[in-house]
Amino acid sequence: MILKEFITSTGEIILYNGNPDFEKLEILVSGAGDIWHSSFEQGYKNAFPELVYQTAVFFMFINDFDNLDECVSWRVNPNQFAVRKSVWEQLKGFDDEYQNVQLKALDFGYNALRNSAAVPLYIKGLFQENFQEKINITAKDRYVFFRKNFKLDHSVFMLYREGFWKWKEWNAFFYAKKNFGLSVKKTVVEPRKLLPIEGQPIVSYIIPTMMRQDFTLQLLQDLAVQTYPLSQVVIVDATPENARDEKLYQAHDFPFELIVKWQETKGSCRARNEAIDLCTGDYIVFGDDDVRVLPDFIENHIKVLQTYKAGACNGLDIRADNQQQNLTDLNEKLERINENRWKAGVSSSFSNANSCVKTEYVRKLIGNDVNFDGGYGEDSDFGLSLLKLGQVVLYNSFSPNLHLKPPVGGYRFWGSQAKILGKKRKIQPWELDNPVKLVRPVPSPTVMYGIVKHFKAQQVLEYKYKYFFLYLFKGSKRGFLYRFLRIPYKNLQFKKSLFYAKKLNNLGIRYK
């Protein structure tokens, strides 16, 4: 493919095909994007839905977002797109092993987003031509894409779902298996050099905690020596009265405003929402109570967001070997992964243990959805909600934390009752007016709620098929018969989880 060149006022070369609005492109180049297109109006929105056979509902970009002028989207139109020349050359352009040019572009955008730490963006009106292309991806094309990008198991699953009785599917499967292999490790786009912080932005830090006051105090000491000073730290502590030391947090010991709120409600989502109401900063950093951070942690969060002109980022989470490890151990771990650490791009997940968000976008979301209290999934929900605002949630490798993960304490204490059945069980928030009795719902009803909330009904069904496919075939061969016989009970558990998820979804998003 021969692309034309556009040189920006800063001297950067942008390659393009089609007829972009150069004034708009000049502005976009200073932002987070690396690849730009207007494909939604050109027939590419939600193209290649068969990707669900690999990713199910665990890829936040399986669906394109609605009613936005700008958002993350990997569905590139090969006839109308622009890309930084440096990124095009690092990624070596389109894969010429594909015959279908549409699939070349989709493969390029998909891998740029998921594997190569580049940022592909849909920009409404960047390309004025809205000719609706017919997307023509054959069965052979589908299997070639799967064979080149995923393990063979996913092609087998697609064969099962598309119709194993169809000769066309078998023919395409064997064609791809014979002629193509899994692509080598993808090139990763180098992160940009971080610029100095502009102005004097005010930063608030939120710590929800429960029965971990010693860990929280340790984190406060790390936050007190940051190279870019925090203005405010808000602690919402749910430690029971008979187990807490109210004199432990002394505001005069720290160089920032320290606000301590003793939580009377239940749940980490409610705790964060109560803390958000007290924040006064331009940025809010979300952290768990059991992390350690380096002195440049806050500085690099702000630098990343300002350098890329992004609204949110998710830091690098390093798991400790034990809860006694410290910052020396963190530095040693970072040295060991040095070659694989450095990337930016769009984060594939979101974690409340280490993230930084512009306060204006936190306010737009109001806070965490408390329907997730008592379970899991609130992090992913918050990140996906930011993306649905049109924000780019960056992966920030410059702000690592050491996650100590102590075996006791924390908000999961409340949710630990979820595995208990019978009279000793304490009702969880997600049970509402239907307490769990004989059948324990699996997967977690709150995780299922997040799936029902954000994905299409057909995709929820595909998730169910994949869930049981993996349950049956990913275990030991000797245990296959046992797993097969348990399918009826597993199905009851799945239906029970879906029952609670739909009840939560019918309630709608709640913040209190």
Image (spheres, helix red, strand yellow):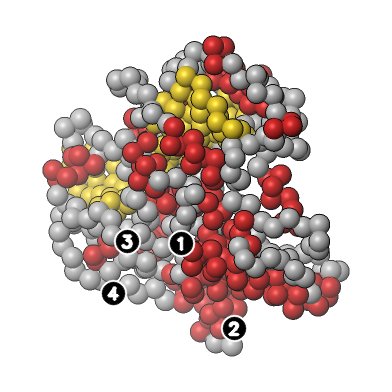
Report the amino acid beneath label 2: Phe
Marks 4/3 in contact by CB < 8 Å: the verdict is no
Label whose residue precedes the other's in the sequence (2 or 1) = 2
Lower position in the chain sequence, tag 4 or tag 2:
4
- Mark 2 vs mark 3, foreground winner is 3
Residue 209 image position (x, y, % from top left): 62, 34
Pointer 3 residue: 66
Residue at 41 percent across and 63 percent down: it is: 63
Tag 1: amino acid = Gly
Q: Residues within 10 Å of mark 3 (few under 14, many from 20)?
A: few
Quick check: 239 above or below 294?
below
Q: Secondary structure at mark 3?
A: loop
**How many discs mark residues in the rendered view?**
4
Mark 2 vs mark 1, CA separation in Å: 39 Å
Q: Is residue 333 above or below residue 311?
A: above
Q: Check disc 2 and report the residue beneath it.
A: 164
